[in-house]
Amino acid sequence: MLIESSRSKPLQSLASTLRNHTRISQFTTRSPMKEIKIKRPSNPSSPSNSDAKCSSNVQSTPEIEKKYVHRVYDAIAPHFSATRFAKWPKVSTFLNNLPSGSVILDAGCGNGKYLGLNPNCFFIGCDISAPLIQICSDKGHEVLVADAVNLPFRSGYGDAAISIAVLHHLSTEDRRKKAIDELVRVVKKGGFVLITVWAVEQEDGSLVNKWTPLTRKYLEEWIGPGSPRVRSASSVTLESIPETEVSVVNEEVKDFGNVGQREVKDKQQEYFVPWHLPYHRAEVSGASVGAVENGLARKDDVKGAIVYDRYYHVFGEGELERLVSGMKNAVIVDQFYDKSNWCVILEKTSC
């Protein structure tokens, strides 16, 4: 089921918008990597010390992300990369309509499938997974290992930034907001940011039945206070939920109603999404043996694969817009639903 938000503008408006914003800087030479500056912590004696402490807490990675995002993608990187080659048309349109010479920052670049897509622009990618970054580097891309909530670029460094299927791996709203703040910070005034996230309103509702909803016990154990609330009253423990028998809350996914700008409170939004690494792929690195022993993965002899669980917070309609609506230095210029993803395009309005 394709969902088109009544608030959405046709994608053609993006091309027009980008062409009309001629104030994006033009570059004739490639910016050397030595110009990338890593942000330094605030001086403890400065007036903004309390803000720095708050930022430090947000930048501290929760255990659930370390175990069920970072370590998983490190383990499945070669297989994941082999399955990630198709470009989303709307992402391609966004990149191809940027002015020639633009510097584009890809935060969470994965295997680098969008790096270099527009041959007239300069791309720099970063990802938290060192094995994925190595894959990008082997392809000749300019990349580095970095966290989405603490991007290693100086403010106003790029002309545009993209975050494709990244924010849904962050386990708290504060961290998701921080990642958006970082994307806006690193682009120039007048620059654009494209963000896409998985939607709870999936076109193929049967896919959700293959996901494991996180339970209250698990959320309390791994994420701790102040993290995502549990949307389901289920008292079943994680270990007792067979992957093939998982059900969503007592309402069909397609029946998501008129959510609009209100928060999605009546739907399960925290999930483990399985990744099946074929046995012959798992034997390449040998790391999966240790992963099974340590409880990071499990064997599925029926499918002949090692199964890794990836953490996802799937977004409800209006949730992504709500996260960015309070920003003082950026505005939404487009928002749409595409291929079971909620997407927004932001323009930075001030430094």
Image (cartoon, helix red, strand yellow):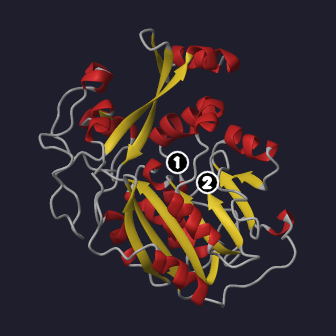
Question: What amino acid type should be assigned to the residue bearing mark 1?
Answer: Thr
User: Percent position (x, y) of residue 117?
Assistant: 69, 59
Tell me: residue 209, above or below residue 121.
above
Task: Name the outermost residue toward the left.
Answer: 250
Taking the image as shown, residue 36 lies to the left or right of residue 216, namely: right
Which comes sooner in the sequence, label 2 or label 1? 1
Query: Is any part of residue 342 visible from this angle?
Result: yes
Q: Quadrant of residue 197?
A: bottom left
Gap in Å between the C-alphas at discs 2 and 1?
9 Å
Q: Quadrant of the C terminus?
A: bottom right
User: Percent position (x, y) of residue 259?
Assistant: 19, 64
**Point 77% across, 76% down: residue:** 101
User: Looking at the rendered structure, which numbered label has been put on residue 147?
Assistant: 2
Residue density around tag 1, few if under 14, some if 14–19, many if 20 or more, within 10 Å: some
**Point 46% across, 51% down: residue:** 170
Q: Quadrant of residue 240?
A: top left
Q: Secondary structure at mark 2?
A: loop
Question: What amino acid type should be assigned to the residue bearing mark 2?
Answer: Asp
Tally the numbered discs.
2
Residue on which the image places disc 1: 61
The reply to whether discs 2 and 1 touch (Cβ–Cβ < 8 Å) is yes
Q: Secondary structure at mark 1?
A: loop
Label 2 vs label 1, nearer the camera: 2
Residue density around tag 2, few if under 14, some if 14–19, many if 20 or more, within 10 Å: some
User: Percent position (x, y) of residue 12?
Assistant: 47, 76
User: Looking at the rendered structure, which numbered label has been put on residue 159?
Assistant: none
Query: Is any part of residue 214 visible from this angle?
Result: no
